[in-house]
Amino acid sequence: TPAPKADLYIKDYTFNHPPKVGEPFTVSIGIFNKGNESAPAFKWEWRAMTLPLESPPQCGQKINGLGAQTGVMVFCTYTYSRADTYKTRAKVDTENVVVESDESNNLKVQDVTTIP
């Protein structure tokens, strides 16, 4: 029998409306633990564009643990300054501190095209 482990992943990743240049919008990110063990404290982040990766994320914070088979919604408000198509990125367990049954599902990338 495999040892109990957490399994964090991005279940939901939506924008409250198509982003328009110069107007704030909100990103909703559903973080869930589909594993059979609670996850200890971990951090999440959202980036308005995937490059350059050395730039700081636009949002992120620490979650003080997440029970097995439970989830939490987090939110980020952001404003794009120019029209373009961006690869946005949401990630859980950014410091890789949670031992998980599947480490490959912690990142979700989504394209968004801003409205001029």
Image (tube, rainbow, N blue to C red):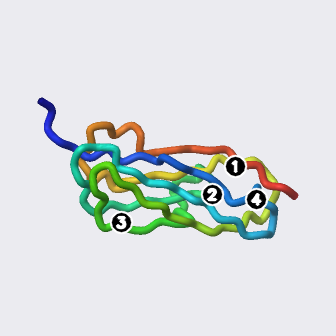
| Circle nearer the N terminus (1, 4) | 4
Q: CA distance from mark 1 to mark 4?
A: 11 Å
Residue 102 in the image: x percent, y percent?
32, 37
Residue type at mark 2? Ala
Q: CA distance from mark 4 to mark 3?
A: 27 Å
Which element is circle 1 on? Answer: strand
| Circle nearer the N terminus (4, 3) | 4
Q: Residue placed at 26% from the left, 47% from the top?
A: 6
Residue type at mark 4? Pro
4 vs 2, front mark: 4
In the rendered image, the quadrant that contains the N terminus is top left
Q: Which mark is residue 19?
A: 4
1 vs 4, front mark: 4
Q: Residue placed at 48% from the left, 60% from the top?
A: 45
In the foreground, 56 or 85: 85
Residue 64 in the image: x percent, y percent?
30, 67
Category of crowding for the residue at label 1, using alpha-carbon neighbours closer than 10 angstroms: few (below 14), some (14–19), many (at least 20): some
Location of mark 3 (residue): 63
Location of mark 1 (residue): 86
